[in-house]
Amino acid sequence: MIYKEGMLCKHFKGQDLLHKNIYKIIKLGVSGDSIDLNTITYTGDGMLEEASDLVVYQNIFQNNKYFAREYYDISSELSLDQQEEFHQKIRVQPLNNEEIKLVTSEKFIVEKNTIEEEKYELKRVKK
């Protein structure tokens, strides 16, 4: 098993850590029928009620945003082209110690929050 509860991970999309979503693993092995859609967004492809072995995770830079997706899906290997483009092997990859130090540093947090606010503002203006 790749993931552990409390572990910090990065989504593959984004050119660098500042532009990738950073997640904290909240719970492993969750069944779909126990997911509260009022607090958790299911991002899998199937029917939630039939889903099993879900991973619940939180975007640490977007307060109160929780997601659930099948373990096999978030741990799936990227295509060789995607690995080259995004510099990681799997869809949601655990951070190494150096990356953990970086994403928990005050400077990174300020920069990341600025980027998140700009993305939110851009979405708000487009509406």
Image (tube, helix red, strand yellow):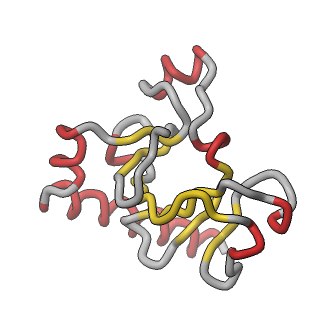
The residue lying at 42 percent from left, 45 percent from top is 10
**Residue 42 to residue 8: above or below:** below
**Residue 102 position within the rendered picture, expressed as x and y whole percent measured from the top left:** 18, 47
Residue 105 lies in quadrant: bottom left
The residue lying at 38 percent from left, 65 percent from top is 60
**Residue 72 to residue 58: above or below:** above
Q: Nearer the viewer, residue 85 or 46?
A: 46
**Residue 123 position within the rendered picture, expressed as x and y whole percent measured from the top left:** 57, 68
Residue 41 lies in quadrant: bottom right
Q: Nearer the viewer, residue 74 or 105?
A: 74
**Residue 29 position within the rendered picture, expressed as x and y whole percent measured from the top left:** 60, 58
Relative side of 127 to 119, left or right: right
Relative side of 4 to 57, left or right: left
Q: Nearer the viewer, residue 36 or 113?
A: 36
The residue lying at 59 percent from left, 65 percent from top is 67
For the C terminus, give its image quadrant: bottom right
